[in-house]
Amino acid sequence: MNEPERAPAWHIAQWFNTPAPISLEAQRGKVVVACAFQMLCPGCVSHAIPQLKALHELFAPQGVCVVGLHTVFEHHEAVTASVLEAFLHEYGIRCPVGIDAPARDGRPIPQTMAAYRMQGTPTFLLIDRQGRLRRQVFGLVPELRFGAEVMQLLMEPASATRKGPMS
Amino acid sequence: MNEPERAPAWHIAQWFNTPAPISLEAQRGKVVVACAFQMLCPGCVSHAIPQLKALHELFAPQGVCVVGLHTVFEHHEAVTASVLEAFLHEYGIRCPVGIDAPARDGRPIPQTMAAYRMQGTPTFLLIDRQGRLRRQVFGLVPELRFGAEVMQLLMEPASATRKGPMS
Amino acid sequence: MNEPERAPAWHIAQWFNTPAPISLEAQRGKVVVACAFQMLCPGCVSHAIPQLKALHELFAPQGVCVVGLHTVFEHHEAVTASVLEAFLHEYGIRCPVGIDAPARDGRPIPQTMAAYRMQGTPTFLLIDRQGRLRRQVFGLVPELRFGAEVMQLLMEPASATRKGPMS
Amino acid sequence: MNEPERAPAWHIAQWFNTPAPISLEAQRGKVVVACAFQMLCPGCVSHAIPQLKALHELFAPQGVCVVGLHTVFEHHEAVTASVLEAFLHEYGIRCPVGIDAPARDGRPIPQTMAAYRMQGTPTFLLIDRQGRLRRQVFGLVPELRFGAEVMQLLMEPASATRKGPMS
C-alpha cells in the first residue's frame, strides 16, 4: 500500500451538537471517524446512521473524534438546516454533525465532499493520530471489521511509524 | 364487536402522485388502505413506509386504493411540502400521498389525524367497500395478518352483510 | 391458468404434535397449508420455520390445517427422528409435523417430496377446500401475499367454482 | 478490574475441521476466540454461528485462533457427532470445532463448559497471548465492540503488561 495521504481540511457551513466548530487540524493526536451522509439517502438512514451512533457511543469515551458530515448533493433547496436539525433530534444523533459547505461555483457537490472526491453517500473516513487518511469507504464497512480498524488506529502511538496488522 | 363506524372524511392540503385529489367518499365500493406517517418518524421510515409500498404493489392492481397520509404533528416549519416531495422521490414511493391539512386553530395535530383520533405515527386504516372503518392500528400490523385482512375485505361483496373470519 | 390439480396424498412415516395421523383426504373441506423443510437447511430454519409458526398461529384458529413435512433428502442417517423431535422442541414448533416416508427403492428423495416433484426445501403448498393444489412454491412467499392467498382460499365456499382475485 | 485468570484447559472428545487436536496450551502467544454453542440452540444458530464465521474469516488470516466448542447440555442422545458433522457442512462452518467432552459423572454439563462455569449457550471466550481469559460473555457481543476487543488483544505484545483502552 502507498503511504496514506494527509486528510484534506473540512469546510463546514454550520455545526450541530458541539459548542464550537471542529477543525480537523485541531484533532491531530486523536483518531477521527467521520460519516458523510444525506438525510434523504435511504441507505444512510437505515444503515450508516445507526453505525455512526454506535461508533460514537463506543469510541467517543475512548477519545475518538466521531462526527457526521451532511454532504448534500441533491435537493439543495428542500433540505434546509432546520429540517436537518429536526432529523438529528428525531433520530437521536448526539455526535457533532457539520453541514458540508456548498460549492462556491454553484455546482451540486459541496466542498468537503469534493475535496475527498467522494463517490456518494454514505462514505466513511478513518483518519489516524497523525492526520493521515487511512481508509475511505463508499458504502458500509462490516461492523466487526470497522471496530477492529478503529481500535488499531487507537492503539498506534501518535508518532508511530509502526503499522498494525490491517494497514 | 360493535358495528364499525363510517370512516371520517379526509382533509388534505396537497396531493402527490395522483392527477386529481382523492376523496374518500368517491372510493365507495372500493377497499381503502391508508398509512398515516411522518417523514421524520424513524419507525415510519424503517417499517411503515416499506409496508405501504408493498401494500400498494400487491393490492393496487386488484383495485384497492392504497394511500399515504402525511400527518405532521411536530417540526411543522421544517417539514415543508418540498422536502416531503424530495423524500417521496428518494424512497421510491409511487402511491398517492396527501398532506394532512393543518389545524385551523393553530394546534399541532392536523385535521384528518384529529378526526380519526390517531395516537401517533404510523397509523394504518382499513376501510371496507361500504366506507366503514374496519381497523385502525397505531403501530404495525404483522404482514401475514395484514395481507389476510385486506383480502378479506376484498372478497366481501360491496353490499355485504356477511362478515369474514377476522371481523 | 390451467385447472389446478388434485393434491397428491402424503406418505408419512411418523407424526409429531398430533394425537393421530393426518390424512390429506380427511382434510377435504378445509384449507391446508404445508411447509416442506429440513432441519439442517439454513434457509428453512431462518425463514421458513418462523413463517410456518406464524401461519399456524394466525390461521389454525380459523380452521386452516397447517402442517410441517420433514422431507429429508440428504444426511439420512444423521437426521434421526429423535434429533428432529429435539429440534421441534427447541424451536417451539407446535403444529403437526410429519416425517416424509423414505423412498422404497433407496433413492434419496422421500415419497411425498417425489409425488409433488419438489425442487428442494423449503417448499410451501396451498391446498383449497376441494383438495386442489392451488400453489406450490420453492422458496419463500412474501408474508403479505401469503396472508392474502390463504385468506382467499378460506373465503371460498367449499364447493366454489368462483375464484378470487389472485387465482 | 481484577487480574484476569488463566483460561482453563479444554476437554474435547472429537475435533472437526482440523488435522490435529487443538490444545489451548499450545496456542500461547496467539489470541484465541472461542464460541461455545449447541446446534439446536436457536439463538446460537441465528446469531452466534454467523458471528463465529465472520470472526474466523476476518481474524484467522491475522493469526487469531478461532474455534467453536460444541457444549451440549441437553438432548445428549439425539445430538450425535454425525448430525453435528452434517450441521457444520450445511452451515458452511470451516473453523475448527471441538465436541466438549461429556461429564465423567453422567451430569448433563460437559467438562469444558463446567470448567468455565458457563451459564448457557452461546458463550464467547476471549483469551490473550499470555493465555489469560480476558472476556467471557453469555449471549452476544455487539460486532463493533467485538472487533475492537479482538484487535486490542492482537496489538498487545505477547509479553505485555501494558493494557489497552478496553481492558
Image: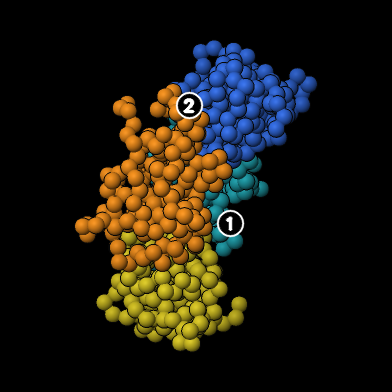
Chain colours: A cyan, B blue, C orange, D yellow
Q: Which element is circle 2 on? A: helix
Residue C145's disc is none
Q: Amino acid at mark 2?
A: Phe
Q: Quadrant of residue A107?
A: top left
The label on residue B59 is 2
How far apart are labels 1 and 2 at the CA level? 42 Å
* Residue drawn at point x = 30 percent, y = 27 percent: C2
Viewer-proximal residue among B155 and C9: C9
Residue C47 versus residue A166 in the image, above or below: above
Tell me which residue sits at (43%, 44%) in the image: C26
Q: Quadrant of the C terminus of chain B?
A: top right
Vertical comparison of B19 with D115: above or below:
above
In the rendered view, tell whether residue D160 sits above or below residue C73: below
Q: Position of residue D75 (x, y in %)?
A: 46, 71
Q: Is residue C64 at least partly visible in the picture?
A: yes
- Pair 1/2: label in front: 2
**Quarter the N terminus of chain B occupies:** top right
Residue A110 as seen in the image, left or right of residue C78: right
- Residue C32 lies, in percent from the top left, at 44, 41
Q: Position of residue D151 (x, y in %)?
A: 44, 67
Question: Element at badge 1?
Answer: helix
B132 or A158: nearer the eye?
B132
> Residue A60, percent across and down?
57, 58
Q: Amino acid at mark 1?
A: Glu
Q: Which residue is mark 1?
A: A57
Q: Chain of mark 2?
A: B
